[in-house]
Amino acid sequence: MTYADYRDGKPVIITAALTGGVHGKEANPNLPETPAEIGEAAAAAEAAGASIVHLHARRANGERAFATDRFQAVADAVRARTEDVILQHSTGGTGAPDALRAEPLRTDPAPEMASLDMGPLNRYQHLTSENTRGLVADLHAEMQERGIKPELEVFNGGHLNESLAILDDLDEPPYLNLVFGGGTTTIPHPRNLLTLVENLPDGVEFNVLAFGPHQLPLTTMGILLGGHARVGLEDNLYYRKGELAESNAQLVARTASVAEILGRPVATPAEAREILRL
Amino acid sequence: MPCPYLDYRRDDADHEFDTERAYCTAVESFVQPMRADICNDRYDLDHEAHCEFFREAER
């Protein structure tokens, strides 16, 4: 993906990260938590231009859940309410035992995509999500067995090293999600997005995820560089400074509008499947 | 054993929820769902080792 892809008007894939597992309604009451709420949010996001929905599962009180049956309930609710959107299950899980991390891959049917965290990530003051190479390999192997395309979560430049090391094991095209924010994610600045993109080999498709106020500027820059965009309440609670986002769809609609203004059409789910060869 | 500072509440001055949610009495605030797993010593998590709120409160 390059600036030439932008010039050529290649469709941009918008992923809506609807719920996450870190914060919840205590941070923004509009954040969907139950399967029904997530399903409704997915439908609205698809209508606004999202071709992929990134999914987590929760307990009834909003707390995290990793069990297959919880993901099954979310996936069923999303499929019942959407037209053709691509489901991407998270395999992230700070503090969760390795054995639980594969559970989201075991729904029926399997999700078309899943996230794959490429290395350690600090949380709070005394906690690290380790994401060892062994766990990454095990999760990737199960994804391959079940025909699930991984989205490699590149939280920082070191994780890009980790991703490049397994590039030959990935189905074409590799799909990398470049993450910008605080802590162990890449410092959110345009020059760092440029640097990471310049280190991507030919044939790699990339997505941009930037937390909070960096979501709009860095996803916009990613669109200009030929990449794809992830937005949603998992990553950003606000529409603008001091104003909570009303919905995931509101954030998706803004990015779809930006892409159209910049001359890149928004990918339909069918076009996203073609680009990612799902 | 869950953190002694953990409580489950439906509301405070700024929030009102349909279900009871994890509330930290050490910092007097609802906590993030991920942190609630630490409060509950759920999965591989332990509030004594992983929670700065608990550690600060116990100093």
Image: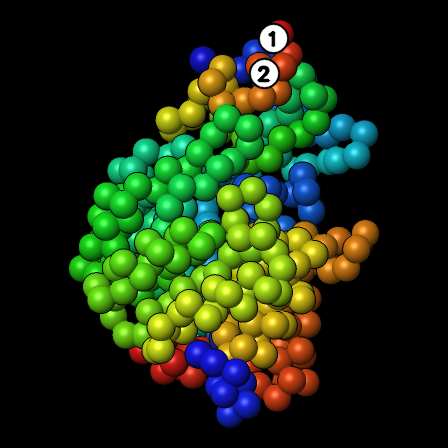
In the image shown, does A25 or A224 lie closer to the viewer?
A224
Left or right, A171 with respect to A161, comes to left
Instruction: Establish if A39 lies above or below A25.
Output: below
Is the residue marked by circle 1 packed among few (<14), some (14-19), or many (20+) residues within 10 Å?
A: few
Q: Is residue B20 visible?
A: no
In the rendered structure, which amino acid carries the disc numbered 1? Glu
Left or right, A61 with respect to A277, comes to right
Q: Position of residue A36 (x, y in %)?
A: 53, 54
Residue B57's image quarter? top right
Are the residues flagged by discs 2 and 1 in contact, CB closer than 8 Å? yes
Q: Position of residue A31 (x, y in %)?
A: 63, 51
Tell me the quadrant of the picture where the N terminus of chain A can be found: bottom left
Residues tagged by mark 2 and mark 1 found on one chain of the structure: yes
In the image shown, does A160 or A31 lie closer to the viewer?
A160
**Residue located beneath label 2 in the image:** B54
Q: Chain of mark 2?
A: B
In the rendered structure, which amino acid carries the disc numbered 2? Phe
Instruction: Establish if A83 lies above or below B2.
Output: below
Residue A248's image quarter? bottom right
Is the residue marked by circle 2 packed among few (<14), some (14-19), or many (20+) residues within 10 Å?
A: many
